[in-house]
Amino acid sequence: MQTILSLQNITKQYPGVTALKNFSLDIREGEIHALLGENGAGKSTLIKVISGAIAPDDGTIYFTRSRNEYNQLNPSLAKDEGVEVIYQEFNLIDSLTAAENICLGEKYGRLVNYEIMKKKAADIFKQFNIDINPTALVSELSTAQQQIVEIAKAVSRDANILIMDEPSASLSVSEVKCLFEIIYKLKEKGVTIIYISHIIDEIFEIADRVTVMRDGNYIDTKNTSNTSRKELINLMVGRELKETYPERDTSSQEVMLEVKNLYGNGVKDISFAVKKGEILGLSGLVGAGRTEAARVIFGAEEKESGQIFINGKQVMINKPEDAIKLGIGYIPEDRKKQGCFLEKNVRWNISFANLKNISHYLIVNQKKEEQTAEKYKELLNIKTPSLYQIVKNLSGGNQQKVVLAKTLAVNSEIIIFDEPTRGIDVGTKQEIYELMCELSKQGIAIIMISSDMEEILGMSDRILVLTKGRIAGEVQKEDFSQDYILELASGN
Amino acid sequence: MYIKSLALDVLKKYAIILVLVGIIILFSLISPYFFSWRNLVNIFIQQSYVIIAALGLSFVMISGGMDLSIGYQISLVGVITAMSMVWFNLSIPVAIMLGIITGICLGLFNGLASITLKVHSLIITLGTMTIFQGISYIITNSNPIYGLASEFKFIGQGYILGIPFSVILMIIFALVASFILNKTYFGRYVYAIGGNEEAARLSGVNVKKMKLLIFSLSGLFVATAAIILVSRAGSATSATGVGTEFTCITAAVLGGVSFKGGSGKVWGVITGVLILGVLSNGMQIVGLGVYPQYIAKGLVLLGAVGFDTYQKTKKGKDNKILKNDNSKEITTV
Ligand SMILES: Nc1ncnc2c1ncn2[C@@H]1O[C@H](COP(=O)(O)OP(=O)(O)OP(=O)(O)O)[C@@H](O)[C@H]1O
Ligand SMILES: [Mg+2]
C-alpha cells in the first residue's frame, strides 16, 4: 500500500517537557492506524501537528497526494490537504444547535439552509441509533451526545485523512459499536483513519496497524494481526503490567447511603442503598440517567421529591456544599467544564476542594497544601514537569487525574466516581482500581458510573442498570454478564 | 532557548511596570518639575482613593463580575457621611461608620440583585448605578454639603510622620487585599468562581454566598475611597467620585485583571492606577489639557490590551509550503 502522509523527524518542546522527539511515521493510504501510549506520551501533540493546531520546532510533514511538504501547517491548510480531526477536547459551540455545529463552515447556496442542516444531522444520528434532537442546543446535551455531535461533524465532511483522538472515551458499548460501523463505512470509501484510544481491545478490533509511543519517542509499529495485548502494553509502559481487578472482602452489611423514591433532573423513582465498603456500579446507555441521578443526590441539581439517608439518618441536601459537609464526594464526568480550573496550576487544583480542612481560620496552610498535592501526584502518577504547571498544559489523561485527586484529597465517606478512568492509560487505570479497593477497605462506600463494561463488571460488587431515568434492574455479582446488563439497559 | 523564553515570560509579566517607569522617565526628561519629591507624593495622594476603589472592583472582576456603580457608590457614601456630620451633628466616627455601612449595603444590594435576577452583574450594576445616582441627588438636591470638621479633613489631608494619611490607608488596604487574595481560602474561591464557576460549585463552594461577600467587600473598599475623597475635597456633592468606575476598570484591565475573571494581581492594579495617574499629572505639567489626556489614556489601554492579545496569538505563521513536487511532475509529463 502507498503512503498518504509521511512525518519526518518531528520535534516539539514545551518548557520542561519534550512532547515529541525526532518522531517519524508513515501512514498508509486507506488504513486504520492506531496510536497507543501512556498519558502524556505525545499522541495529541502529534495529531495537533498534523492538523496544524500547533507548529513543531523541527521536522517535516509530507502529503503524498498533493506532494506538498510543510514544516508547519495551519488549520485551513490542513483542511485543504483533506485532514479532519476530532479533538480530545470538544470544539463545539455551546450556544448553537447540534445541526448548526455539524454544518459549521459549510455552505449550501447563498443563505443558511436550516432544513438541509437538520436533515444532515438527523441522518448521522440515525446511523448512531441515538436520539439527539438536531435542533437541541449543544449546551443541553450530555457529554456522550456532544461526543457524537463532534464525531458527526468530522464524519460529515469529505476527508482524506480522518483523525480521532479518543472518540470512544465517553461512549458506552453500543455507541462504540455504531462508531465502528461508521469507521468501517469510511474505510470502504477509502478514507484513511488515525485512531487514538486507551482501550486496547478497540485497537485490535478496528485497527490495521498500531504505533506505540512513549515519552514523545517512536517505539514501534505493529500489524494488529501479529501482536498481542501483552506485547503492546509492554512496549507502551516499558515493563510487564499485571492487569487484574483486585480482590476485596465484601462482607459488610452496614448501609451507608440510602436513596428512596428519588425524582428530579429527569430521573424517576430511584431507590437503592450502598453499604460501607461496597462498590456499587451504575450502568446504562448514554442518557439513561446515571449522571443525572448522581447529580441530584449530590445536590448539584434540584430534587423534586424523595429522601436521602446517611447512616440511617435522613439528610437534606440542597447544594453540593451540603453534600460535601455530609461526607459525600463527587468526581464529575466532564473534566474541562465541571472538574478543573484550567488556568490554575496542579497544586492549586488538587488542594482546592480540601482548602477549608487545611486552613487555620482563613489562612491556607501552604505546606500542607504542597504535601497533599505531592502525595496525589505520586499516587495517581500525574505527569507534569512540576506542581506549578498550569492544568491547561497537561495532557487529557493527566487533567483527568488532577480532577480525581481534587475530590480524593477531601476525605469523604461516600464517593461518587463518574467515568473515573475516562482517557486514562492502562497502567494508571490499574493504580486507580487499586486505590478504589484501598478506599473500600477503609469502609468508604463507592458509587461508580462507567461506560466501560469491563471496568464496571470487574470493579463492582453489585450493578444497578438504568434506562430512561428509571432503575431497570439490579444485578448481583454472581449474575454479572455483559449480555444481561446490555439487555436490561436496552429496556427489554 | 529556554532561558530566552523565560526572560521573555518575565518581561511579559512585568511589562506594565516597565511602561510605568517609561512614562515617568519620559515626563522627567520633558519637564524639570515632574520628577520632584513633592510632585511624586502628590500623585500618590491624588491616586490613593482610586487605588482603594480599584482594589475593591478587582475582587468583583476576578470573580468574573463587573461593577459599573462604583462612581455613584462613592457619591452616595460621601453624601451620607457628610450629611450625618453636617446636618445631623453626629460625631466623626459615627458618621464614618455610617458611610462604611452604607457602602457595604450598596455592595450587598448589587450582589443580591445579581444572584436573584441571575443576570450578569454588568447589567445589574448598570441599573443600580442610576438608582444610586437618583438617591444621592434626592438627598443633596444638587447642593454641595460644606462645613466638614477639620478633624474629618485629616483623613484626606493630614500627615503622620511626614507620610500622607490617605497614602497610609492605601497601603493598609493594598496589604489587606493582597493578603485576602493570596493567603486565604476566601481568596482562592474568588479566583475559582471567576475561573470555572461550575467546578467551584461542585467542589463545595457556596457560590451565591461568595458573590454576596465579594460585593460587600468591594463596597467596603469603595466606601473607604469615598471617605478619603470627600475628606480631601472638604465638601461632598452628588457629583463627587462620578466616573471613578471607568478609571478603575481601565486600571484593572491595564494591570492584568481578566475581563473573563479568574486572574489578577494587587500589584498589577496599583501599577495600572499609577500609570493613569502619572499620565494625567505629567500631561498637566507639560501643559496638555484634560482632553488630550483622555486620548492618551484610551490609547494606553488599547495598547496594553493589544499587546496582550498579540502575545497570546503569536504563533502559527510561516506556513509556507516548503517544496512542491508538482512542478517537477508537470515538466516530466
Ligand atoms: N501547551 C502545552 N504546554 C506545555 N506542555 C504541554 C502542552 N501541551 C502538551 N504538553 C505536554 O506534552 C506532553 C504530551 O502531551 P499530549 O497531550 O500529546 O499527551 P497524550 O499522549 O495525548 O496524553 P493523553 O493520553 O493523556 O491524552 C505532556 O507531558 C504534556 O504535559
Ligand atoms: Mg491526548
Image (cartoon, rainbow, N blue to C red):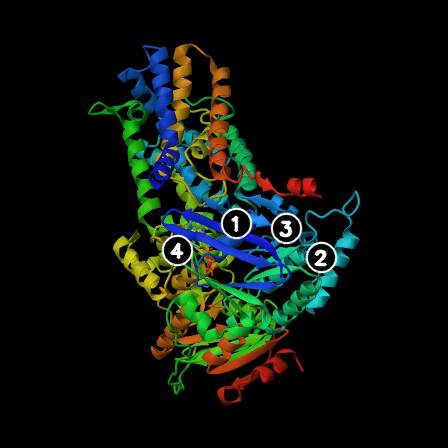
Which residue is disc 2 drawn over? A135
- Viewer-nearest residue: A4 or A17: A4
Dot 4 or dot 2: first in sequence order is 2
| Marks 1, 4: nearer the viewer | 1
- Viewer-nearest residue: A414 or A380: A380
Residue A198 visible, this orientation: yes
Left or right: A491 in relation to B223 = right
Q: How many numbered marks are there?
A: 4
Q: Establish whether labels 1 and 4 are both on one chain.
A: yes
Which residue is disc 4 drawn over? A349
Q: Amino acid at mark 4?
A: Asn
Label 4 residue SS: helix
Dot 3 or dot 2: first in sequence order is 3
Q: Amino acid at mark 3?
A: Ser
Placement of the C terminus of chain A among the 4 image quadrants: bottom right
Q: Amino acid at mark 2?
A: Thr
Numbered mark located on residue A49 in the image: 1
Left or right: B291 in relation to A264 = left
Q: Establish whether labels 3 and 4 are both on one chain.
A: yes
Circle 1/circle 2 CB separation < 8 Å: no
Q: Quadrant of ligand 1?
A: bottom left
Q: Amino acid at mark 1?
A: Val
The percent coordinates of residue A251 (x first, y second) are: 39, 87
Circle 4/circle 2 CB separation < 8 Å: no
How far separated are the C-alphas under marks 4 and 2? 36 Å
Which residue is disc 3 drawn over? A95
How far separated are the C-alphas under marks 3 and 1? 29 Å
